[in-house]
Amino acid sequence: MTAHFLSAHGQGLGQVGQPTIHTHKTLQMWSARISLMLFLKLYNEAERELDAFGEMTNPDLYYEYHEKAYPGRKGKCWQKVHYSSQ
């Protein structure tokens, strides 16, 4: 389900490095996807998925990058979440 949703929004498998527009919905879906992987103990798969986000400093993770979609908004489109495999 998460893969289908993200693919429909131009994200996911095979899209690393491609221009994308993050929304609250797509970032929530990424969060759910990673959370489910961790719950299922798919740690290596979750790590590979998170690699696409780098250090969470990519310009497309900030409102200013999406000026047309979020006019006048500034800051991060995401909230920092800490995951632990323990």
Image: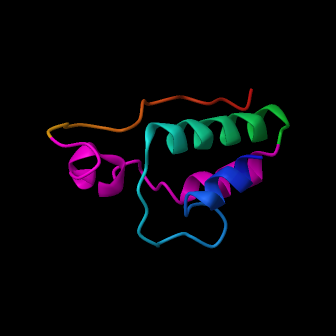
Q: Provide residue 34's location: percent of width, then percent of height.
A: 67, 41
Identified at 60% across, 43% down, the residue is 30
Question: Is residue 78 covered in magenta?
Answer: no
Q: Dividing the picture into quarters, in which one does residue 20 lie? A: bottom left
Left or right: 85 in relation to 74: right
Q: Dividing the picture into quarters, in which one does residue 9 lie? A: bottom right
Q: Provide residue 10's location: percent of width, then percent of height.
A: 55, 64
Identified at 76% across, 45% down, the residue is 43
- Observer-nearest residue: 59 or 26? 26
Viewer can see residue 28: yes
Identified at 27% across, 44% down, the residue is 63
Identified at 62% across, 59% down, the residue is 8
Which residue is at the far left?
72
Pick the quarter of the image with the C terminus.
Answer: top right
The chosen color scheme is rainbow
Question: Is residue 70 covered in magenta?
Answer: yes
Q: Provide residue 29's location: percent of width, then percent of height.
A: 61, 40
Left or right: 42 in relation to 17: right
Viewer can see residue 58: no
Above or below, comparing residue 43 to residue 45 in the picture: above
Above or below, comparing residue 80 to residue 55 in the picture: above
Above or below, comparing residue 52 to residue 79 in the picture: below
Q: Provide residue 40's location: percent of width, then percent of height.
A: 85, 36
**Magenta extent:** 42-71
Left or right: 59 in relation to 48: left
